[in-house]
Image (spheres, helix red, strand yellow):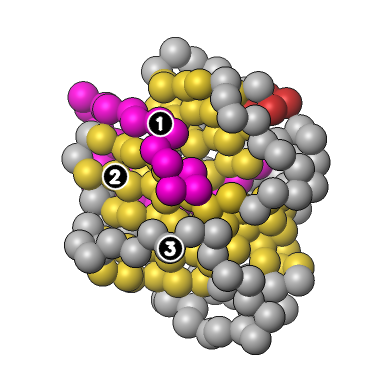
């Protein structure tokens, strides 16, 4: 279910990053009062606030997009946090339902972290963010209040993450998580307050 409403107070994107090869299949600008049926809530801490998705204290209880996505996909959105802790987090190629049952959460897909672990790491992780199967860098750190534009593309086993128009990380998985059980996207988080907006998902 694509949400196509346009709000008059919508903020412009930080970067224009349209791709000629991408075909939009889902959009959400969060210009409404309730999340609605397009999203599956797995815990407390996610709501619409000031025309954006606001998450805080999710403790790895993702907000799953109910629409199944193709394996080769492009996902872009804006995000910012007022907190110095950073911790802007999403999940890609997950099962659309899983959430943490204990403090040691293992994702069903890939976790992308910007300013994770108290603003000390940026990473693309295969399932376990505390494991070794990942690509990571420690810079840049998240700046409180700065609005960032994310573009994440997945083609085959390659996942590329660009931030404000510049590639930050490339993760190449020789055993890609594809097909049933790996068709969903989620916004996630631990404790930090984070705003997400202007989500566009395209097949590529």
Residue 101, quarter of picture: top right
- Disc 2/disc 1 C-alpha distance (Å): 12 Å
Q: Residue at coordinates 33% horizontally, 47% vertically from top-left?
A: 153
Residue that label 3 marks: 16
- Which mark is nearer the camera, 2 or 3? 3
Residue 74 included in the magenta stretch of the image: no
Q: Secondary structure at mark 2?
A: strand
Residue that label 1 marks: 169
Residue 169 included in the magenta stretch of the image: yes
Magenta residues, start to end: 163-190
Residue 143: image x %, image y %?
71, 39
- Which mark is nearer the camera, 2 or 1? 1
- Which mark is nearer the camera, 3 or 1? 3
Residue 163: image x %, image y %?
48, 44
Residue that label 2 marks: 154
- Disc 3/disc 1 C-alpha distance (Å): 19 Å
Return the disc, 2 or 3, that comes first in the chain's sequence: 3
């Amino acid at each position: 279910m694509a949400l196509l409403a346009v709000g008059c107070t919508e903020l412009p994107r930080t970067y224009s990053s349209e791709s000629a090869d991408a075909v939009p299949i889902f959009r959400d600008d969060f210009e409404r009062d309730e999340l609605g049926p397009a999203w599956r809530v797995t815990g407390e801490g996610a709501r619409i606030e000031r025309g954006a998705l606001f998450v805080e204290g999710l403790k790895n209880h993702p907000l799953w997009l109910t629409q199944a996505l193709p394996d080769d996909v492009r996902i872009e959105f804006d995000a910012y946090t007022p907190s110095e802790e950073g911790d802007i987090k999403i999940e890609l190629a997950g099962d659309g339902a899983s959430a943490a049952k204990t403090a040691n959460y293992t994702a069903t897909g890939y976790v992308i972290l910007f300013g994770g672990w108290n603003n000390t790491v940026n990473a693309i992780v295969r399932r376990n963010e505390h494991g070794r199967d990942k690509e990571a860098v420690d810079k840049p750190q998240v700046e409180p209040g700065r609005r960032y534009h994310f573009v994440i593309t997945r083609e085959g086993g390659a996942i590329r993450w660009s931030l404000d128009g510049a590639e930050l990380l490339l993760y190449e998985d020789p055993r890609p998580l594809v097909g049933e059980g790996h068709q969903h996207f989620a916004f996630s988080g631990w404790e930090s307050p984070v705003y997400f907006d202007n989500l566009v998902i395209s097949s590529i």
